[in-house]
């Protein structure tokens, strides 16, 4: 074997030794690297609400979800109840608003606030 | 994602997870990448403390660039090798020294008739490091990336921003210098036994 071949072979053996004898990372270095990662970590973004495929569900979400819809349903029911109830049931709670006035006063134009049929001045 | 599921996740995906607030992704990346770049830094500088500074700085730059990492352009490992090599080259130029010449290194203790393989491997590795310390920076970088880190020449070309032919030329020259430097220590390092 020539000198060059020998030298080459020895060098390859040295490289192999260097690959096996890897300088170890100290615990201190790893701790510093991880501390830097923590310091520089961007904040997690807000988790978006999952988009639901069903059209009806998307409409519910658009109205503010089921809790909001619950309020809508309640308001609708109350309006329906007011509509079908005889006036006497309505008068009682609102009587305090019109002290001394009779029932017909509820329909007084000025009290109801509509001015459509007032003459222009 | 739990830590133990992350070990097969590619570097780039982990970096994206980190940029979105996943701390476990940072731990996996750090454990995976720090040893590689510390190894290169140590081989380039021949000094553990300086190598630690460089490794920390290179990883710091990775954490910083994470939110703006453009996927698909380069591998994270290639990018890190380049960062740490450039930092090492800068540090070497500042130092303007190459470590002690081989013949000034203290003679190893004589008397033991045979050296175990482990000790011999360690001695060879250290002798190689001393020889590496004498190489010009670019030859040293090319030899380390090729023959210790195991990168292919095209990847080294990307790290060093040169042609593949230039890499081959640098590694050839570097190896010739190293071989000559080690030839004087053949008997001591046990090469003549083989």
Image: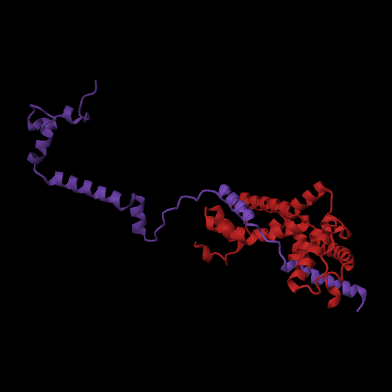
Chain colours: A purple, B red
Decide which of B166, A5 is in the foreground and name it.
A5
Whole-percent x and y of residue A44?
50, 51
Does residue B123 lie above or below A47 as drawn?
below
Q: As drawn, which residue projects farthest toward the right? A: A2
Q: Is residue B36 visible?
A: yes
- Give the quarter of the figure containing the C terminus of chain B: bottom right
Side of B83 where B67 appears, left or right: left
| Residue in the picture at 79% in, 59% down | B141
From the viewer's perspective, tell me whether residue A90 is left or right of residue A45. left
**In this rendering, does residue B152 appear at all?**
no
For the point 57% across and 56% down, which residue is it?
Answer: B26
Location of residue B117 with respect to B80 vertically, above or below: below
Q: Position of residue A99 (x, y in %)?
A: 10, 27
Name the spot of residue B54 as percent of width and height, x first. 71, 52
Q: How many marks?
A: 0
Farthest top residue? A121
- In the image, taking residue B38 as reference, residue B132 lies left or right, namely right
Q: Is residue A70 left or right of residue B47?
A: left
Q: Residue at x 63, y 53 (%)?
A: A28
Q: Which sits in the foreground, A13 or B104?
A: B104
**Displayed quadrant of residue B137:** bottom right
Nearer to the camera, B186 or B28: B186
């Amino acid at each position: 074997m020539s000198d060059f071949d020998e030298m080459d072979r020895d060098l390859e053996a040295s490289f192999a030794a260097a690959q096996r004898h890897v300088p170890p990372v100290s615990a201190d270095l790893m701790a510093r690297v991880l501390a830097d990662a923590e310091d520089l970590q961007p904040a997690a973004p807000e988790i978006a609400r999952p988009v639901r495929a069903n059209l009806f569900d998307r409409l519910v979400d658009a109205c503010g979800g089921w809790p909001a819809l619950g309020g809508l349903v309640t308001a609708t029911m109350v309006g329906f109840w007011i509509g079908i109830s005889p006036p006497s049931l309505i008068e009682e709670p609102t009587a305090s608003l019109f002290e001394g006035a009779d029932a017909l006063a509820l329909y007084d134009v000025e009290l109801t606030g509509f001015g459509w049929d007032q003459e222009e001045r | 994602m739990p830590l133990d599921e992350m070990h097969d996740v590619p570097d780039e995906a982990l970096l994206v997870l980190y940029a979105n607030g996943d701390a476990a992704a940072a731990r996996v990346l750090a454990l995976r990448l720090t040893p590689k770049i510390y190894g290169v830094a140590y081989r380039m500088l021949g000094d553990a403390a300086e190598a630690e500074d460089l490794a920390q700085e290179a990883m710091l730059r990775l954490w910083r660039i994470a939110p703006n990492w453009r996927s698909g352009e380069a591998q994270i490992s290639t990018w890190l090798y380049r960062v740490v090599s450039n930092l090492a080259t800068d540090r070497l130029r500042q130092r303007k020294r190459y470590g002690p010449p081989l013949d000034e290194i203290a003679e190893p203790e004589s008397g033991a008739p045979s050296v175990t393989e482990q000790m011999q491997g360690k001695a060879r590795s250290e002798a190689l490091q001393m020889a590496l310390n004498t190489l010009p920076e670019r030859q040293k970088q090319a030899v380390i990336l090729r023959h210790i880190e195991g990168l292919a020449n095209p990847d080294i070309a990307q790290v060093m921003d040169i042609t593949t032919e230039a890499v081959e030329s640098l590694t050839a020259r570097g190896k010739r210098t190293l071989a000559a430097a080690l030839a004087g220590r053949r008997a001591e390092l046990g090469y003549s036994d083989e």
